[in-house]
Image (tube, grey):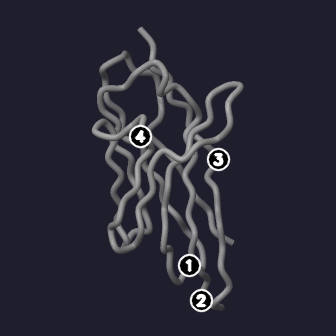
């Protein structure tokens, strides 16, 4: 079993910044992709940003140039630096990890979500 624990959400004014963190724990052999998704009220969950163990990144068009995803492979931790936040960034942000256990079995795990609210 893999547990993802997120932190760093909160209330911020438009134009402000927040940094989200997500730490994975469990009998993890490898995490090949870590990602952040978000879900706003009444909308589907969408990919915000993803990063592979090799450092390749992928961003939603709506956050390019404002958000930066990074990870610490040794700590099985992923971060999302969010700058120039807009009200439309308001959502519950979820951490996601895909990898394999020492047994060789693959896993996909989700965090519990952290609320980000951008409002004046």
Q: Quadrant of the rendered structure where residue 58 is?
A: bottom left
Mark 3 or mark 2: which comes first in sequence?
2
Asked whether, in this view, residue 52 is left or right of residue 17, the answer is: right
Q: Earlier in the sequence, mark 3 or mark 4?
A: 4
Foreground: 88 or 10?
88
Q: Vertical placement of 77 versus 41: above or below?
A: below
> Looking at the image, is mark 1 or mark 4 nearer the viewer?
4
The mark closer to the camera, 3 or 4, is: 4
**Above/below status of 61 relative to 111:** above
Marks 1 and 4, Cα distance to the nearest angstrom? Answer: 31 Å
- The one of 116 and 88 positioned closer to us in this rendering: 88
Could you say whether the residue bearing mark 4 is in a helix, strand or loop? helix
What is the CA distance from the residue labelled 1 to the residue labelled 3?
A: 19 Å
User: Alpha-carbon neighbours of circle 2 within 10 Å: few (<14), some, or many (≥20)?
Assistant: few
Residue labelled with disc 4:
61
Q: Residue at x 32, y 47 (%)?
A: 68
Q: Earlier in the sequence, mark 1 or mark 4?
A: 1
Question: Which SS class for mark 2?
Answer: loop
| Residue sticking out furthest to the front | 61
Identify the mark at residue 102; answer none if there is no mark.
2
Among the two numbered marks 4 and 2 on one chain, the one whose residue lies closer to the N terminus: 4
Name the quarter where the N terminus is drawn.
Answer: bottom right
| Horizontal and vertical percent position of residue 87 | 46, 18
Q: CA distance from mark 4 to mark 2?
A: 35 Å
Indicate left or right for 61 with 98 as reference.
left
Which residue in the structure is indicated by mark 1? 28
- Spatial CA span between label 1 and label 2: 6 Å
Please name the residue shown 61% across and 83% down the image.
101
Q: Could you say which disc has been placed on residue 112 in the image?
A: 3
């Amino acid at each position: 079993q893999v547990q993802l624990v997120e932190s760093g959400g909160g209330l911020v004014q438009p134009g402000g910044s927040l940094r989200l963190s997500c730490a994975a724990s469990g009998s993890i052999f490898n995490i090949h992709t870590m990602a952040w998704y978000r879900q706003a009220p009444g909308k589907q969950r969408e990919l915000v940003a993803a990063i592979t163990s090799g450092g390749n990144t992928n961003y939603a068009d709506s956050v390019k140039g404002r958000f930066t995803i990074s990870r610490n492979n040794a700590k099985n931790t992923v971060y999302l630096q969010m700058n120039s936040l807009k009200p439309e960034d308001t959502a519950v942000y979820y951490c996601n990890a895909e990898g394999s256990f020492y047994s060789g079995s693959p896993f996909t795990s989700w965090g519990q979500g952290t609320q980000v609210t951008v409002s004046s």
